[in-house]
Image (spheres, rainbow, N blue to C red):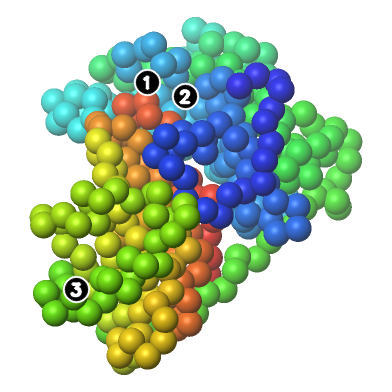
Amino acid sequence: MDAAYRLRATSRQGLSAGLFFALFLTIFSAVANYDSVYFTHKEWDLVCDNTLTCRVSGYSPDSVTFGVSVLLTRKAGAGTPVDNQVMLSDGLGHDDVLAMRGTPQLIIAGRVLGVLQVADRKKISWRMNATQYAAFLRALRRDKPIVFKDKLAEYPLSNAGSSAVMLQMDRVQGRMGTRGAIYKTGKKDDSNVKAPIAAPVIIKAPVKDQAARDMTAQELARFKPALMKTLVGDDAFDCTDDQLNSDHLPWQIARLNKTQSLVIAPCWMAAYNGGSKFWLVDTLMKRPAQLVDVGMMANDYQNGAIVWIMRGRSVGDCWSTKSWQWNGKAFVYSAKSWTGRCRYIRNGGAWDIPMRVSTFK
């Protein structure tokens, strides 16, 4: 996508499998009920979550063998610093690759600016010091070549798209023309910079079952006919008969409290992703079952939460997640995140980039 950016309101429904990556080619915004912002240009992306914390990620050109990703994180509010992290491709977990690497250096326009600092030993990520980071930003603005290098290889970072994305982050956080802007600074102070938005508070109700179990034949005979009648319109179109009625894909149930349970039915299956339908049911069936509004992408239940875990492609180097937390009355949309682009940086994805966060009590 170039300078003609596409905008649309944030969708609170699940996406079809074919629209999975369209999520990451759209700016998400909601004026009255702020949710998240996503912006992408060439090799750089911006995600600002519902608290107005923004994360910018940049990548190597897709054509290189050994890639790198840089993540810049900044909370909303006056005077907040920018944290930086650098992650080099690890060959998707090959120990022989990791053993020979050593500490990477930062090289800008052929000039070595020293080794990086350890940011996260577990994830094997690095951090530029203040001097390196200042030179890094200048190089992005002036389109100078940026390379990270260790004993294994050189990892070029693309400048393409960085200016537009960092400018957009300043715009979202209200920093345009201020002394603290990340890209285009000015003479204005931080008095009108946007303040952080408080994350929604969700009460986590205790549940009887931490995980779902397969329904017995008696339970299936009791619940399934009534629940199938609720699948009308788009909900019926989402699911396939071979999934709903498979002998090898059991329906499941989890007790939430003394009177309510969650029923889970297999709905659809693609090459490496699948989705389920979820119903809130009265254990004694005195009240009508309620189809839980999580679209067609949710696929698991974990300790009081319905979750959506989607693999971006088969090798598992990029993922997206979403969850709805049980508060004792309903399942409330609580969290959403993705791991960055599919660039062979890490198994499980390079980063944790939230789109929506909540405070749990």
Which residue does the image show at 85% across and 51% down from the upper left?
192
Count neighbours of disc 2 (C-alpha within 10 A) and say few if under 14, some if 14 to 19, many if 20 or more.
Answer: many
Residue topped by disc 2 = 59
SS of the residue at dot 3? helix
Which residue occupies the foreground of this view, 12 or 288?
288
Disc 1: CA contacts within 10 A as few (<14), some (14-19) or many (>=20): many
Q: Amino acid at mark 3?
A: Leu
Can residue 138 be seen? no
Q: Nearer the viewer, mark 3 or mark 2?
A: 3
Residue projecting furthest to the top: 110
- Local SS, label 2: strand
Q: Alpha carbon of mark 2 to alpha carbon of mark 1: how far? A: 7 Å
Q: Position of residue 51 (x, y in %)?
A: 63, 57
Tell me if residue 160 comes above or below residue 17 in the rendering. above
Residue beneath label 1, please? 67
Q: Earlier in the sequence, mark 2 or mark 1?
A: 2
Q: Which residue is identified by label 3?
A: 220
Q: Along the line of sight, which residue is nearer the eye, 44 or 307?
A: 307
Residue 14 vertical position relative to residue 203 in the rendered view, above or below: above
Query: Which residue is painted at 84% across and 35% down in the image?
Result: 177
**Secondary structure of the residue carrying numbered label 1:** loop
Marks 2,1: beta carbons within 8 A: yes
Q: Say which amino acid is labelled 2.
A: Tyr
* Distance in Å between CA atoms under marks 3 and 2: 49 Å
Callout in the foreground (3, 1): 3
The residue depicted at 41 percent of the width and 16 percent of the height is 62
Residue 277 visible to the viewer: yes
Which residue is at 39% across, 61% downward?
231
Amino acid carrying mark 1 in the image: Gly
Name the side, left or right, on which 52 lies relative to 72.
right
Mark 3 neighbour density, 10 Å: few (under 14) some (14–19) many (20 or more) = some
